Image (spheres, rainbow, N blue to C red):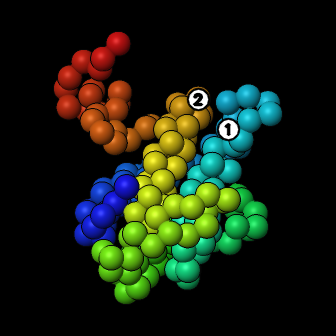
Amino acid sequence: MYNSISQFLKDWDYESNSTLKVLNNLTNESLSQKVSEDGRTLGFIAWHLAQTIPEMMGRTGLKIDGPGEKEAVPDSSKKISDGYDKATKSFIDQLQKSWKDSDLSTVDDMYGFKWSRGMTLYFLMLHQTHHRGQMTVLMRQAGLKVPGIYGPSKEEWAEHGMEPLP
C-alpha cells in the first residue's frame, strides 16, 4: 500500500517504462500467440494493461485518457504500446493534479471491495507486473527477444559477454 504519491510515482516510472520495453518488443505477428488453445493472446494481455489504467483509476474518480474498456484489441503492436503510453502519461498527469498524500487513505468501492486509494495504486502496480510476466512467456514462445526488467534477460547476458544462467 502506498502512503506517498511521490513514492508511487518513483515506482511507477520504473515499472511503466519496463512495461513499455516489453510492449515495444512485440510484433504484429506475435499478438496472436497463446499459451494454449483456449488461452488469452499476447495482444489481449498487452491491450488489457493499456485498458486497465483508465478503467481501474476511473473507479477512484480520476478521468484518464486512454483505451476504453470495450475497445477491441488492435492488430498493431504499435497501437497497443501507444495506447499504453497515452494512458500512463494521462494517469501521471491526473494523479499529480488531483491527489495529495492525504487522499491515499480515501476508500473507494473497487470491484465489490473497499480499498484505500493507496491500496488501489499498489494493486494497479501488481496487476501490471503479473501480466507483464505472462507476456514474457508468450514472447519467448513467439520467438521474440525479452527485455530484462529486474536483471538481464537471457539475450542480454550474451550481449554483455556473459554466459546466461541455465
Give SS at disc 1: loop
Disc with the residue nearer the chain's start (2 vs 1) = 1
Q: Is residue 26 above or below residue 81?
A: above
The answer to whether residue 78 of the structure is visible from this angle is no
- List the residue tagged with mark 1: 33
Residue at 46 percent of width and 78 percent of height: 90
Residue at 49 percent of width and 38 percent of height: 133
Where residue 71 appears, as percent x and y from the top left, is 74, 68
Where residue 120 appears, as percent x and y from the top left, is 48, 61
Where residue 132 appears, as percent x and y from the top left, is 49, 44
The answer to whether residue 87 of the structure is visible from this angle is yes
Residue that protrudes farthest toward the right in the picture: 38
From the viewer's perspective, is 150 left or right of 125? left
In depth, the one of 152 and 112 nearer the eye is 112
Q: Amino acid at mark 2?
A: Gln
In depth, the one of 59 and 28 nearer the eye is 59
- List the residue tagged with mark 2: 141
Give the spatial CA distance, label 2 vs label 1.
Answer: 8 Å
Please identify the quadrant where the C terminus is shown.
top left
Residue at 49 percent of width and 57 percent of height: 124
Where residue 24 appears, as percent x and y from the top left, is 47, 54
Q: Are marks 2 and 1 in contact (CB under 8 Å)?
A: yes
Q: Quadrant of residue 118?
A: bottom left
